[in-house]
Each structure stands twice: as structure tokens, then as C-alpha cells.
């Protein structure tokens, strides 16, 4: 789900468990990660998944200290649990998510 505004972002991260992908449309590794993020969103019903375009939402990127993309941030009840920067294969991302459950 592509985030449209700060309110929508807050609703997503305030859920029990959320994964947010900070990306840019021009970023090569972000494009490689996109189908993996989509697959995680479709295959896992215990986590909300959202995407934030850093060019459209610079304020959100700045708020969460996103300096490189892609940056994945796990949230639990609105609080940052962990951050992962760069491309990672789906099995590694699923393991990372499971380790923070």
C-alpha cells in the first residue's frame, strides 16, 4: 500500500505490527525489492505493509532518519522496532520479521 499522507502513515504504524518500505522510483535496489515487499504483504496476514516514496514524503523520511534507500522499518504499536538498509532477499526479510515478532 502506497502511503498518501501522514495520517494514513500514522494509522498503519499504530497497528500491532507494520513494515514500512522507504523507497524512490528511480532507485535500482528499490525496484528489485518491490516484488519481495509485495509478496510479503500478500503472504503474511500478521503484518501491515506500506511503501513511502521519499521524494513525495521527505518529511517522513527525515522524521525516521532515512539517509539511504531502500530502508525498511519495522514498527510495533507505533514504535520503531528495527531498521534494515539496502536490498535483502525474501528469506532473510522473513527471518528478520519473525525475529522481531
Image: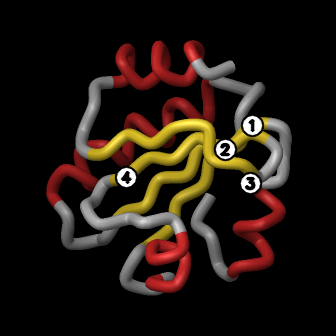
Mark found first going from the N terminus, 4 or 3:
3
Q: Nearer the viewer, residue 1 or 101?
A: 101
Instruction: Count all numbered tags in the image, as a single digit.
Output: 4
Label 2, secondary structure: give it: strand
Q: How far from the left and from the top, in percent, is residue 30?
A: 27, 54
Mark 4, residues whose alpha carbon is within 10 Å: few (<14), some, or many (≥20)?
A: many
Mark found first going from the N terminus, 3 or 2:
3
Give the Cα distance between marks 2 and 4. Answer: 13 Å
Q: Is residue 94 above or below residue 49?
A: above
2 and 4 marks in contact (CB < 8 Å): no
Residue 86 horizontal side relative to residue 59, left or right: left
Q: How far from the left and from the top, in percent, is residue 94?
A: 48, 19
Give the Cα distance between marks 3 and 2. Answer: 6 Å
4 and 3 marks in contact (CB < 8 Å): no
* Residue bearing the label numbered 4: 71
2 and 1 marks in contact (CB < 8 Å): yes
Residue 55 horizontal side relative to residue 10, left or right: left
* Residue bearing the label numbered 3: 13
* Residue bearing the label numbered 1: 17
Mark 2, residues whose alpha carbon is within 10 Å: few (<14), some, or many (≥20)?
A: many
Q: Nearer the viewer, residue 93 or 79?
A: 79
Please report the residue visible at 62 percent of the width from the left and 70 percent of the height from the top. Answer: 3
Label 3, secondary structure: give it: helix
3 and 2 marks in contact (CB < 8 Å): yes
* Residue bearing the label numbered 2: 75
Give the Cα distance between marks 4 and 1. Answer: 17 Å
Give the Cα distance between marks 4 and 3. Answer: 15 Å
Please report the residue visible at 36 percent of the width from the left and 18 percent of the height from the top. Answer: 92
Residue 16 horizontal side relative to residue 60, left or right: right
The part of the image, by quadrant, that contains residue 13 is bottom right
Give the Cα distance between marks 1 and 3. Answer: 7 Å
Amino acid at each position: 500500500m502506497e502511503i498518501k499522507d501522514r495520517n494514513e502513515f500514522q494509522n498503519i504504524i499504530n497497528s500491532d505490527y507494520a513494515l514500512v518500505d522507504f523507497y524512490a522510483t528511480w532507485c535500482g535496489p528499490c525496484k528489485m525489492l518491490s516484488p519481495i515487499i509485495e509478496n510479503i504483504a500478500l503472504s503474511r496476514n500478521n503484518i501491515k505493509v506500506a511503501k513511502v516514496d521519499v521524494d513525495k514524503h521527505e518529511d517522513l523520511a527525515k522524521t525516521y532518519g532515512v539517509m539511504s534507500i531502500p530502508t525498511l522499518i519495522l514498527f510495533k504499536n507505533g514504535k520503531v522496532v528495527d531498521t534494515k538498509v539496502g536490498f535483502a532477499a525474501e528469506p532473510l526479510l522473513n527471518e528478520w520479521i519473525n525475529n522481531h515478532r
